[in-house]
Image (cartoon, rainbow, N blue to C red):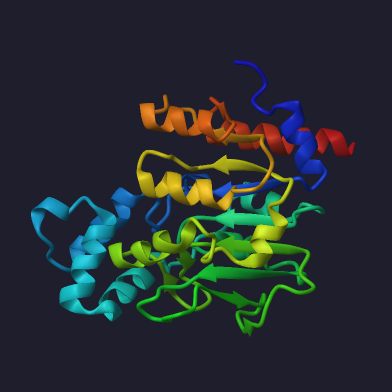
Amino acid sequence: MSHPVPVDLFEALEAGRLVPYLGPGVLALAGEGPLPASADQLVARLTAKAAVPHKIRNNMTAAAQFIENFKHRTTVTAVMTESFGPQLAPSPLHLWLAGLPKLPLMVHVWYDDLPQQALARRADWGVVQGVSQAEHFGVWHHFFQPDGARSAGADGWSTLLYQPLGSVRPAANFLISDSDFVEVLTEIDIQTPIPECVQQLRQGRSFLFLGCRFANQLERTFARQVIKRSSNRHWAVLPEEPTKNEAKFLQDNNIRRIEAPLEAFAAALMSDALSSAV
């Protein structure tokens, strides 16, 4: 196998022109732990707490919607908080990314708080999270300072962590049910749910997808809309053979597939950075 880190990718990272886009698969780099690391694992947690019809037992958003309809939204939030509440230390990759001197924007599309933990050693960062219309009608996102306090915006932050699906911390905001996503997807083509600061920071920058799959329409739509009006060159670490829909998505969005396993890619990326610094 050729070296897994393309030269132009590494150059973009060093120059602050690369945005890491972390999916649930990145959790595996933190080792075995108590947190759900895939939609399949998460829907198993949801359905273990509340009975749902058999035909939707493997559908994460539909199962969450059924529980919300018949057990109330607070039940969904409680199960999500319990599922992602246990502490798990950030992986070396989380810590390394958080320590980059030029990291204007990082995107995290899962519900754990490992990126926040990794950034906690710094003071010049903050978070913007998507919030559910079921709980915050008319509001699309909330800003948080490093200490978890609400903020009016992202002014003065060197690094912005964008979590479009929400996160367990600091305020247990979750986009998880069908209705949550219907609300967002209704507006996302005109970019309303995406914070203006994110739209500005992505301009001219490339994205690096880590621990992501694009197997369903929801995953593809979120990724496509987040990278909208950015650079025309992106990368995705995807060792598994892509599905037909994934391959088309990669081609349509100028995303170069890197076939290396995520752990090997992360090790090579950090090794290259160490060599460059010597």
Q: Write down the quadrant of residue 156 in the picture.
A: bottom right
Q: Position of residue 196 (x, y in %)?
A: 65, 66
> How many callouts does the rendering have?
0
Report the residue that reaches farthest toward the right: 278
Report the residue at 55% width, 56% height from top: 108
Report the residue at 50% width, 60% height from top: 88
Report the residue that reaches farthest toward the left: 54
Q: Position of residue 32 (x, y in %)?
A: 43, 49
Q: Position of residue 120 (x, y in %)?
A: 68, 68
Judge left or right: residue 77 versus residue 124.
left
- Residue 16, above or below 232: below
Q: Write down the quadrant of residue 5 in the picture.
A: top right
Report the residue at 38% width, 67% height from top: 183
Report the residue at 30% width, 67% height from top: 179
Q: Position of residue 225 (x, y in %)?
A: 53, 51
Say which quadrant the C terminus sits in.
top right
Say which quadrant the N terminus sits in.
top right
